[in-house]
Image: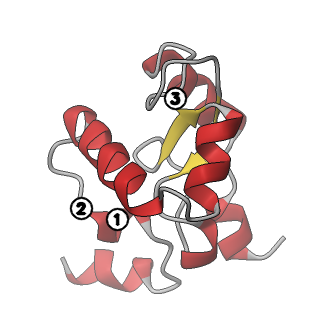
Amino acid sequence: MHRQTKKTSIPKEVKQRVFERDGCCCILCGRPGLPNAHYIRRSQGGMGIEQNIVTLCPKCHNDYDNGFHREDYGRAIKDYLETWYPDFPDEQRVYSKFDWLYKEWT
């Protein structure tokens, strides 16, 4: 498996923690949902970490992924994630093959 694919996939443990954190419901509308929505898209390198994953119902997830409400939902998701992880920057939600280099210099 490619390193980026591995980093953007959502491990079972992360899904469980996110599901519990979100109360098993869509954080946007409150309906039952699944913990498999990336705030920062996988295609943009969004990692499968709990700071980047939220629980969404199928309708909200589809609307978010397909751009029907991408901007509004994105702001709501970011606000929600910031209540849990207040000082977690978006840069740390994105996979970089040079992460090891940044860690050595900081």
- Residue ID for mark 2: 89
The residues tagged by marks 1 and 2 sit, at their Cα atoms, a distance apart of: 6 Å
Proximity of marks 3 and 2: CB atoms separated by less than 8 Å: no
Instruction: State the residue position of label 1.
Output: 92
At 62% across and 45% down in the image, what residue appears? 61
The residues tagged by marks 3 and 1 sit, at their Cα atoms, a distance apart of: 17 Å
| Relative height, residue 55 to residue 79 (above, below) | above
The three-letter amino acid code for the residue at tag 2 is: Pro
Crowding at dot 1, Cα within 10 Å, few <14 / some 14-19 / many 20+, comes out as some
Give 54 or 57, whichever is nearer the viewer. 57
Residue 82 visible in the snapshot: yes
Q: Is residue 1 left or right of residue 87?
A: right
What secondary structure is marked by label 1? helix
Q: Earlier in the sequence, mark 3 or mark 2?
A: 3
Report which quarter residue 19 is drawn in.
Answer: top right
Q: Amino acid at mark 1?
A: Gln
Image quadrant containing the N terminus:
bottom right
- Please determine whether, in this image, residue 23 is positioned above or below residue 83: above
1 and 2 marks in contact (CB < 8 Å): yes
Q: Secondary structure at mark 2?
A: loop
Mark 3–mark 1 CB contact (< 8 Å): no
Please name the residue that numbered disc 3 is placed on: 18
